[in-house]
Image: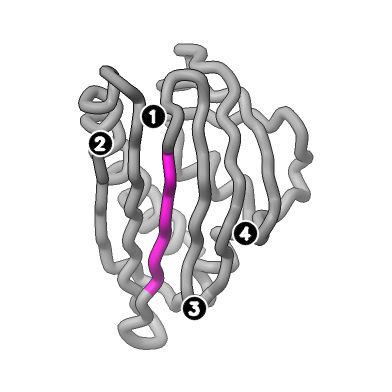
């Protein structure tokens, strides 16, 4: 199943991309729906093509979901981001981010996620719809603060 959410963010594509590089951005925009505690990287970690990292993943900050692994396949300001992700509960969580600059102060941002989790797929898809709507609201808050 696929989740897709699009919003217009009040920032340039460059500003959004610079924030995408940072693990702390993921941690901020995911909270409180999910927490990601690094298992194999430190706070200076930056995403990039070929990076793979693992996290202790908790739903709502307290329901343990095991180790979530993120492998970056594309990471480019113009073509966006593509990652292959998963954990023991969700075997496929392929996430793409597209950035389409509208003007120097506004960018259309799209999250598209393909989910496969066996019989749990529909329930994961329901949660993911709420999660990505939440993430995009948090992105807007983050960008307005800067």
The kind of secondary structure the magenta stretch mainly shows is strand
Name the element at disc 4.
loop
Q: Earlier in the sequence, mark 2 or mark 3?
A: 3
- Tell me what residue is drawn at x 31 percent, y 83 percent: 102
Spatial separation of the CA atoms under disc 3 and disc 4: 14 Å
> In this rendering, is residue 47 above or below 84?
below
Q: Nearer the viewer, residue 30 or 116?
A: 116
Q: Label 1 to label 3, Cα distance in Å?
A: 29 Å
Closer-to-camera residue (140/20): 20
Q: Earlier in the sequence, mark 3 or mark 4?
A: 4
> Split into 4 quadrants, where in the image is the N terminus?
top left
Q: Which residue is mark 3?
A: 78
> Mark 3, mark 4: which one is toward the viewer?
3
Mark 1 vs 3: CB contact within 8 A: no
Is residue 94 one of those drawn in magenta?
yes
Q: What residue does disc 4 label? A: 21
Answer whether labels 2 and 1 touch (C-beta < 8 Å).
Answer: yes
Q: CA distance from mark 4 to mark 1?
A: 21 Å
The residue carrying mark 2 is 130
Label 4, residues with CA under 10 Å away: few <14, some 14-19, many ≥20 = some
Classify mark 2: helix, strand or loop.
Answer: helix
Tell me whether circle 3 and circle 4 mark residues in contact (CB < 8 Å). Answer: no
Pointer 4 or 1: first along the chain:
4
């Amino acid at each position: 199943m696929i989740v897709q959410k699009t919003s217009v963010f009040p920032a340039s594509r460059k500003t959004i991309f610079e924030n995408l590089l940072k693990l702390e951005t993921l941690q901020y925009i995911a909270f409180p729906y999910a927490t990601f505690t690094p298992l194999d990287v430190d706070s200076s970690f930056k995403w990039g093509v070929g990076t793979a990292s693992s996290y202790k993943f908790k739903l709502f900050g307290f329901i343990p979901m095991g180790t979530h692994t993120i492998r970056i396949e594309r990471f480019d300001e113009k073509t966006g981001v593509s990652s292959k992700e998963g954990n023991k509960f969700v075997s496929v969580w392929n996430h793409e981010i597209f950035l389409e600059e509208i003007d120097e102060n506004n960018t259309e941002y799209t999250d598209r996620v393909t989910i496969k989790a066996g019989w749990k797929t529909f329930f994961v898809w329901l949660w993911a719809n709420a999660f990505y709507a939440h993430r995009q609201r948090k992105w807007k808050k983050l960008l307005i603060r800067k």
